[in-house]
Amino acid sequence: MRPDGTQNYCKSTFVKALGNYVIDVIVDHANRMQSPLSAVVIEYYASAVSRTAQSPVSSVDKFQARLVGFHARYTP
């Protein structure tokens, strides 16, 4: 949901694993988000997404990642 007049800022990156350090960093940054409209999204990519034209078989070693996205939404 995007109410009229909100400002939006998104920043994301891929990480190969969600170890304790990565989770601590995500939680630390999420706790700094001041607007209740903001969100943190973690998406897991593997399986069909990892298939390429050269190799129709999924290769976990080639591509297995999580997208971590911070979506800041606020009203000015």
Image (cartoon, helix red, strand yellow):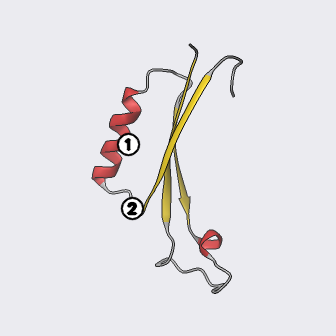
Q: Amino acid at mark 2?
A: Ala
* Residue 33 horizontal side relative to residue 2, left or right: left
* Residue 24 horizontal side relative to residue 74, left or right: left
* Residue 68 horizontal side relative to residue 1, left or right: left
Q: Secondary structure at mark 2?
A: loop
Q: Secondary structure at mark 1?
A: helix
Q: Nearer the viewer, residue 47 or 72?
A: 72
Name the disc covering residue 36, or none.
none
Residue at image mark 1: 26
**Up-down: is 15 above or below 41?**
below
Q: Quadrant of the C terminus?
A: top right
Quadrant in which residue 29 is drawn = top left
Q: Quadrant of the N terminus?
A: top right
The spot of residue 57 in percent (x, y) is 62, 84
The spot of residue 41 in percent (x, y) is 53, 43
Q: Residue furthest left?
A: 21
The spot of residue 58 in percent (x, y) is 59, 80
Q: CA distance from mark 1 to mark 2?
A: 13 Å
Q: Residue furthest top?
A: 76
**Up-down: is 19 above or below 38?**
below
Residue, x 32% and y 43% (percent of image)?
25
Binning the other alpha carbons within 10 Å of mark 2 as few (below 14), some (14 to 19) or many (20 upward) gives few
Quadrant in which residue 18 is drawn = bottom left
Name the disc covering residue 17, or none.
2
